[in-house]
Amino acid sequence: MKILVAVKRVIDYNVQIRVKEDGSGVVTDNVKMSTNPPDDNAIEEAVKIKESGKASEVVAVSVGEEKAQETVRKALAVGADRGILVKADGIIEPLAVSKILQKVVEKEKPDLVFMGKQAIDDDCNQTGQMLAALLNWPQATFASKIEVKDKSLEVTREIDEGLETIEVNVPAIVTCDLRLNEPRYASLPNIMKAKKKPIEQITASDLGVDTKPRIEQIKVEEPPKRKAGIKVASVEELVQKLKNEAKVI
Amino acid sequence: MSRETMEYDVVIVGGGPSGLSTAIKLKQLNSNLNVCLLEKASEIGAHILSGNVFETRALDELIPDWKNLNSPIKTKVTKEKFLFLGKTKSISWPTWLLPAVQQNHKNYIISLANLCRWLGEQAEALGVEIFPGFPASEILYNNDGSIKGVATQDMGIDREGNKKDSFEPGIELLGKVTVFAEGCRGHLGKQLIKKFELDKDKDPQQYGIGFKEIWEIDEKNHEEGLVMHTAGWPLDNNTYGGSFIYHAGNKQVFLGYVIGLDYKNPHLSPFDEFQRFKTHPAIKKIIEGGKRISYGARALIEGGFQSLPRMYMPGALLIGCDAGTLNMPKIKGSHTAMKSGIIAAETINEHIKDNKKLSVFEEKLKNSWLYKELYEARNVKPSFSWGLILGIIFTGIDQILFRGRMPFTLKHKHADHETLKLANEMPKIEYPKPDNVITFDKTSSVYLTGTNHADNQPVHLQLKDPNLPINYTLEKFDEPAQRYCPAGVYEVLREDNVNKFVINSQNCIHCKTCDIKEPSQNINWVTPEGGGGPKYGNM
């Protein structure tokens, strides 16, 4: 079994995001970038499945600018066998990413495609689902547990009501939740080894995918500042304020 | 437990200006050398904080062509001001009356973090292997007592010291020479100074704590290239310190404050002094209407020549501010740190090629401009132990008339942890509440640093005696850790009429002030799990 894992380069989750003064986007110059956190879980799960002998190869793929190579390299350092970087500049919307991944899947012919449930930068939560539609494959989203069976997967999903367990036939798309596993650290020797693993570089246009955005972004702005809270003296006062000032009851 | 080992010609600990300069110079001298560099931050630059007005002298020597290599050194200093602040008034000091060391017209306003990122790229292009996110946590010795390398921190240990599922043991990195370049108060450097008595016959090291904020300000208040310093208010005559306000590109100002850690009043809060400083009319008018976008703090070296330890030992060199090469009257340490890194590389190259001893470093240092600079600067800082006014008068005579060549050397008498007076003997200080426009509290400030430490890891701020903060330090000094820590790590909480000392280690921004100032030297700063700590952008 071969597993393709999609990873995205995003602003590190610890960085305080700053909106550009002209509202055209957020500041990314000299900002620490990292792998999208649930994509780390996706890689970890794929590597674990390989280590258990149920997969033969793990291929990491990223779509983005030249520097996204670092994200692929990180995946190689924690156990992926080889990498693919599809170079594309500017904003690449989920639909374009899905189309690119579709082409990569047609070329690589994996049995499973793993990725994070959503990216922490645009929060779209669309790529896995769109890819499933484009490939006409079954999908298991928000996975918090994956069991590999003979020709199917048993996947536990994190849903509003609790946990849902479903079975999907292979080939399938799985999008991963943070609860799926605890990603391992990249050790120094493995980082060294990863430097020697191959990364194939192609461009979106090589794959014949038009990445032009379909959505026009008008403005990016910071959420309004939260006003300071007030203390009330009694329950009566609270009810009164909720009724008359907040008008919520 | 056996750890994997990796062998190199040279292992460098720390990716700041000194360590990166060593790495680059080594590869320039001999491209066949295997050089690796460890950095505890998640990426090069993320733990770097500095003013910074940059003198290019060392960089001119290291990479003469830097102007054509897209370096982040762009904003030339165009104008200088020096203000003495009273509580509401200010007096401008004519810059022609400033000592030559404080004149900046050939220098540049830069972000040292970005310079380090750029130096990191240069080093990698030369073949240096850079490993960010890997703190060196342990020194490794040969049987003969010489240094054989360092070990990186184990990863995946829980708070109680047990191995988690994700446990990943540290690696031993062995080098013919190990270079320690951790910056001010490096936690391995501290051990080396003690073990090899590198500070024998030297004065105790002196430190300061430096704060920095980056503000985006109104265009009409911005004057790109303007460098301004202040002395005086809000500090009293007996506390050493001052501010900097540098107008960088993109309508940004780098605004900061440095306070000598030899301050005496345990009620003093360096953070609050800095915040209060911004409310002075002469300062407030610059940043009013602007927005604070970054905050950080870091301890720095102030001891200079008298406190500079021996920088070589068997198998290793100690460079930059891990030793203490900052030039205090110049308020600059980047060019001197880089120069010490260059000298280290030259020494190591001769050591590996011609089997010369590492003690050659000392000779090379003594013949360099770095040594001359530190020698001429040596009497300025100690003269301020007589107070601001006498310090300024003496410095004027020493630096302008004698150019640092007076026939005597003043001493630093005390280490910074010895200078606090008892809390009940010193006046309490009332600090104004933050207005969240010009002044802020520690919580919202720390938030801007992006600092984080993975949950459930051992506390990296170790107490030698866990009962001392409450049983002794609280009573005698009103536990000053609550105030000198710029990140709100230390708190004394009262629960059920019992005082409890709390260490919020996840807030730590790796400034090392606690390790320096704790009156009983009870706090030991050790490296947390790799990649932890602040995520400074262009600091």
Image (cartoon, grey):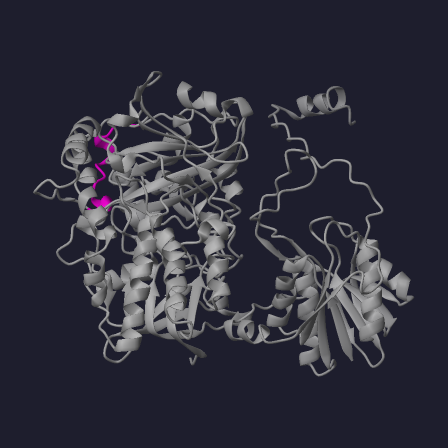
Residue B145 appears anywhere in the view: yes
Residue depicted at x 61% and y 25%:
A230
Q: Nearer the viewer, residue B530 or B286?
A: B286
On screen, B510 above or below A62? Answer: above
Q: Is residue B179 magenta?
A: no
Does residue A137 sit above or below B226 in this rendering?
A: below
Res B266 seen here: no
Residue B211 is left or right of residue B361, and the answer is right
Which image quadrant for residue B311?
bottom left
Q: Quadrant of residue B477?
A: top left
Q: Residue at x 39, y 48 (%)?
A: B511
Classify the position of the N terminus of chain B by image quarter. bottom left
Q: Most extreme residue toward the left, as rendered? A: B407
Q: How many marks?
A: 0
Residue B231 image offset from top left, x and y in percent: 30, 28
Q: Position of residue B92 (x, y in %)?
A: 32, 20
Locate residue B171 relative to residue A210 in the image: left or right.
Answer: left
Q: Which residues are magenta?
A: B415-428
Residue A245, horizontal then vertical, whole percent: 73, 20
Q: Nearer the viewer, residue B152 or B433?
A: B152
